[in-house]
């Protein structure tokens, strides 16, 4: 049985911290689906299609990583795609507290789906999409936090 993992998030935008978590999770799973979750309560800076395109471009030569867009409950999407694992990145203790609450709720809904936490590399702990969006909105240089593909895409659209 293939070990399929879902890495859900808004990825608005996809950062080096996200890429770090995906790359370090690759040896653990047969397939990682990086899924852009759509949340009606959030107004993203970038379209779901753009975020999906970044994932696909970055991992175009890695067949074990797929991009997707989904709506609804994460556990329901896991069932739909056959994922037994949910991957979450942790930067700080506060991230763990928040993510554990979600993991507990997911476990209550489906005991067959396990959440795996990976801590981020120390050099990426300050990398958060919220901060990156703020830098971009104020015309600052967010390149230290973003993959080259995202940077070049942003330059084309300015």
Image: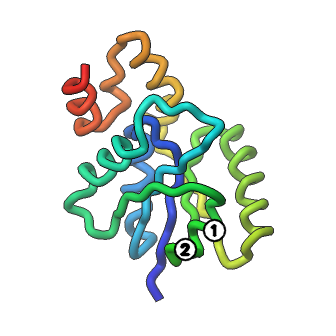
- Residue 101 in sight from this viewpoint: yes
Residue at image mark 1: 76
Q: Secondary structure at mark 1?
A: helix
Quadrant the C terminus occupies: top left
| Nearest to the observer: residue 34 or residue 81 | 81
Tag 2 and tag 1, C-beta contact below 8 Å: yes
Query: x, y percentage for residue 46?
Result: 41, 33
| Nearest to the observer: residue 147 or residue 55 | 55
Residue located 55% across and 59% down the image: 87
| Nearest to the observer: residue 112 or residue 91 | 112
Query: x, y percentage for residue 45?
Result: 45, 29
Single out the residue that lies furthest toward the front.
40
Q: Secondary structure at mark 2?
A: helix
Residue located 37% across and 58% down the image: 67
| Nearest to the observer: residue 146 or residue 78 | 78
Label 1 crowding class (10 Å Cα cut-off): few <14, some 14-19, many 20+?
some
Label disc, if present, on residue 89 of the rendered structure: none
Query: x, y percentage for residue 141?
Result: 33, 16
Vertical order, 149 against 108 (above or below)? above
Residue located 62% across and 57% down the image: 72
Q: Is residue 146 left or right of residue 62?
A: right
- Figure quadrant of residue 154: top left
Count all numbered tags in the image, as a single digit. Answer: 2
- Residue 128 in sight from this viewpoint: no
Vertical order, 22 against 2 (above or below)? above
Residue located 38% across and 65% down the image: 26
Label 2 crowding class (10 Å Cα cut-off): few <14, some 14-19, many 20+?
few
Q: Is residue 12 left or right of residue 118?
A: left
Q: Is residue 141 left or right of residue 88?
A: left
* Cα distance between the residues tagged 2 and 1: 6 Å
Residue at image mark 2: 80
Vertical order, 31 against 117 (above or below)? below
């Amino acid at each position: 049985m293939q070990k399929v993992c879902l890495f859900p998030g808004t990825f608005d935008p996809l950062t080096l911290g996200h890429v770090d978590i995906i790359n370090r999770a690759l040896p653990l799973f047969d397939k990682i689906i990086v899924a852009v979750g759509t949340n009606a309560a959030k107004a993203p800076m970038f379209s779901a299609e753009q975020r999906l395109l970044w994932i696909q471009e970055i991992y175009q030569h890695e067949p074990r990583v797929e991009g997707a867009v989904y709506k609804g409950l994460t556990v329901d999407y896991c069932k739909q795609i056959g994922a037994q694992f949910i991957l979450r990145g942790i930067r700080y203790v506060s991230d763990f507290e928040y993510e554990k609450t979600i993991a507990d709720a997911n476990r209550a809904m489906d005991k067959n789906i396990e959440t795996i936490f990976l801590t981020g590399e120390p050099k990426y702990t300050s990398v958060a999409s919220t901060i990156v969006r703020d830098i971009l909105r104020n015309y600052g240089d967010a390149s230290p936090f973003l993959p080259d593909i995202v940077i070049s895409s942003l330059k084309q659209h300015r």
